[in-house]
Amino acid sequence: MAATQSTDDKILTAFSELLFSNGYEGTTTKKIAEQAGVNESTIFRHFQDKHGILTKLIEGYMADINNISDSFEIKGDIVQDLMRVAKTYDQFIENHKSLFLLGLRNGYQFPEIISAIKQLPTHLKAVLIEKFTGMVKTGELDKDVDLDTAATNFILLNFGNAVFKYAYPNAGLYVPMSKFTKENIKEFAEKLKS
């Protein structure tokens, strides 16, 4: 038997879906209530207003960032390791695509969005530099690789593909994940090898 979604979860899911398709301004509490199958007054009781729902969505994003390090398991093969990290990054953005897009579209209006969105690349960069440092010590990475630049480039590669996927889906610039990891990430990782 499937677990039933809590009222808060229904509201958060509806808000996230509408945010993705309509943007923040186009997502009204009335639309959220209709999509969630609740009365509009329920939204106000649970979250006070639309911004309260946004705040809760950001809290979920931040909690997921804190858990993402567990997915960055380095097994000693730089190509496979970075392919796995790229897939994890893509899945994270997929799970939080409405916040990702809101940050791109309206970040200037919501400093808390920018603050939350920048946590992922900041956290990922720190984890990558730590892992790359270990790989240099084991001889897996070339000792002459600038680890800060390599970590930044890896993030930019993944971020750019995510931007094309969600912000410009019809531009023909997004590389599907299977091809992206097998070609783009593999080529990037090969250049880091010693």
Image: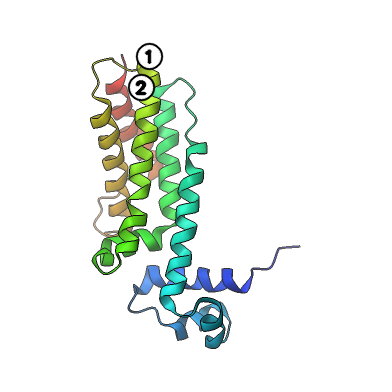
Q: Is residue 44 visible?
A: yes
User: Picture quarter containing residue 39?
Assistant: bottom right
Residue 127: % across, % down: 40, 34
Mark identifier at residue 133: 2
Looking at the image, which is closer to me, 81 or 29?
Answer: 29
Residue 87 drawn above or below residue 57: above
Q: Secondary structure at mark 1?
A: helix
Asked if residue 96 lies left or right of residue 165, the reply is right
Mark identifier at residue 26: none
Mark 2 is surrounded, within 10 Å at the Cα level, by few (under 14), some (14 to 19) or many (20 or more) other residues, namely some
Say which residue appears at 55% left-offset and 82% top-offset: 45
User: Picture quarter containing residue 80?
Assistant: top left
Q: Which residue is mark 1?
A: 137
Residue 51: % across, % down: 41, 74
Chosen colour scheme: rainbow
Residue 50 drawn above or below residue 81: below
Asked if residue 160 lies left or right of residue 82, the reply is left
Say which residue appears at 57% left-offset and 83% top-offset: 42
Residue 13: % across, % down: 52, 68
- The answer to the question of whether label 1 and label 2 lie on touching residues, with beta carbons closer than 8 A, is yes
Amino acid tagged 1: Lys
Where's the N terminus, which quadrant?
bottom right
Residue 94: % across, % down: 43, 54
